Amino acid sequence: MIFLLAAPAEMSYLDLIMKGGVLLIPLFLLSFIAIFIFFDRYFYMKGQKRLDPTFYEKLNELIKAGNIDTALALCVSANCSESLILMKGIQNLGRPIRDIYDQMEMEGKLEVYKYEGNMYFLGVIAGVAPMLGFIGTILGVIKIFYNISLADNISISLISGGLYEKLITSGIGLTIGIIAYIGYHYLNNRVNKLVQNWEFRSVRFIDLINNKTV
């Protein structure tokens, strides 16, 4: 007699994910929040204006010529983070150099807050999502051992059948956490580059008002 073994039923990835339990709801919610924050900050940064070299040439000429009002008007018309920082320095001309630099630095921090927005929550999600997934797995394991204590006999199917389902939450939580982590550091790197450029321009501005060349 020949015994035919039934082929294991195939399961789609979606069906497999849906076996993760109720903790998938907050995990998916965290993923949607992370995606929204990332693209919101990404397109905000991408949409900000950048100053071309001709702007600085005009500004240098105006300040050297003493046309302060025109220099301020030029910064207002540019209407971007760099010009607002420079405008703060122009508005404080006549004060000690240290005070001028401090005022420009404070304005720069305000602009950084605008760029960062809710970016902080990406870092939070990167830490919370894996832990939430791990909690789902732990709760699932507890349930498995509880069922084992009620069963008359212990079988591999009783253990593995529930365990692979509960590991799904850990996998999804880690995936969301990794994506949020990468997104956070990508955006943070872009902000850091902007800050470095602002600091460079601020130092060049201080050199200018000290009768040095930019």
Image (tube, rainbow, N blue to C red):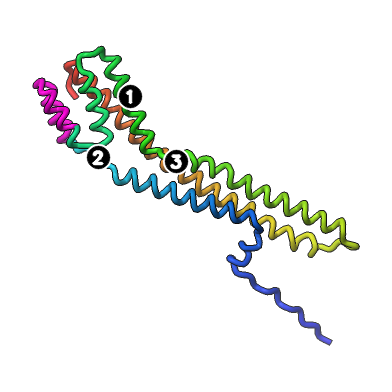
Amino acid type, callout 3: Met
Image check: 203 left or right of 176?
left
Name above or below for residue 194 compared with residue 30: above
Instruction: Using the image, tell me which numbered label, if any, was put on residue 50.
Output: 2
Disc 1 marks which residue?
Answer: 105
Q: Is residue 74 left or right of residue 138?
A: left
Q: Earlier in the sequence, mark 3 or mark 2?
A: 2
Residue 192 appears left or right of 15: left
Residue furthest top as drawn: 96
Q: Where's residue 113, x and y in %?
A: 38, 34
Q: Is residue 4 magenta?
A: no
Sequence-first disc among 2 and 1: 2
**Upstream in the sequence, badge 3 or badge 1?**
1
* Residue beneath the point at 63% across and 47% down: 132
Q: What residue does disc 3 label?
A: 119
Q: Nearer the viewer, residue 9 or 62?
A: 62
Spatial separation of the CA atoms under disc 2 and disc 1: 19 Å
On whether residue 56 falls in the magenta region, the answer is yes
Q: Is residue 131 above or below residue 71?
A: below
The residues colored magenta run: 54-75
The C terminus sits in image quarter: top left
Q: Residue type at mark 2: give it.
A: Arg
